[in-house]
Image: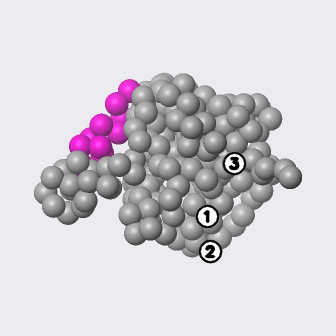
Amino acid sequence: MTISPKSVCVYCGSRDGVRPAYAMAASETGAMLARNNWRLVYGAGDVGLMGRVAKAAQIAGGTTFGVIPVHLLDMEVGKRDLDTFIITETMHERKKVMIMNADAVVMLPGGAGSLDELFEALTWRQLGLHTKPIFILNTEGFWDPLLSLVDHFISEGFASPSLREFIQAVPDITTLEDALAAALS
């Protein structure tokens, strides 16, 4: 009996951001996924942190699975040299295909699109539509305001404490790798 490799969905920016640590974390994430034989599932872009994660995974010999909506093919420079390259009609379809083809979720620094992806995955988890672990790579404290906001939702009575339990924030790649290994074993 062969056990199929696990897949990790990565949400991150289509820009690099201002701190070099963000680009480094993206490259380290791609290499780490490949090193562990975990398939990268991501938004199929070849720009920003998305492109860095995919390139690093490919260079390290990893397997890549990209999903991009037709309207972003030019803007996000659809990376067509992936092992699997899927074009969807809508953003919602993209997010569904990504989460359904992953065993865990990781969010790196990013903007509104990354938040949209995270909150959909988090809401689906809260509603019991999946039980996949969700990790936030909190590079240089980038996601501290988000984590405080989630705690605020809970303290103000708009979410149960389980919402915060669905998110595991980690400070660095080593901790992320260990957490993923434990979750995917």
Label 3 or label 1, whichever lies nearer to me, is: 3
Counting from the top left corner in percent of width and height, residue 62 is at 76, 39
| Amino acid marked by disc 2 | Glu
Q: Is residue 144 magenta?
A: yes
Q: Residues within 10 Å of mark 1 (few under 14, many from 20)?
A: few
The residue most toward the right is 1
User: Could you tell me what secondary structure mostly forms the magenta stretch?
Assistant: helix
Q: Residues within 10 Å of mark 2 (few under 14, many from 20)?
A: few
In the image, which disc is placed on residue 6? 3
Mark 1 sits on what residue?
100
| Amino acid marked by disc 3 | Lys
Mark 2 sits on what residue?
89
Label 3 or label 2, whichever lies nearer to me, is: 3
In the image, which disc is placed on residue 127? none
Residue 168 occupies which quadrant of the picture?
top left
Regarding mark 1 in the picture, which secondary structure is present there? helix
Q: How are the colours assigned in the image?
A: one colour
Label 2 or label 1, whichever lies nearer to me, is: 1
Q: Which residues are magenta?
A: 140-149
Q: Is residue 163 magenta?
A: no
Residue depicted at 79% across the width and 50% down the height: 3
Counting from the top left corner in percent of width and height, residue 2 is at 84, 50
Counting from the top left corner in percent of width and height, residue 88 is at 65, 70
Regarding mark 2 in the picture, which secondary structure is present there? loop
Residue depicted at 40% across the width and 38% down the height: 169
The tag earlier along the polypeptide, 3 or 2, is 3
Which is more toward the observer, 16 or 121? 121
Counting from the top left corner in percent of width and height, residue 66 is at 68, 55
The tag earlier along the polypeptide, 3 or 1, is 3
Up/down of 116 relative to 59, above or below? below
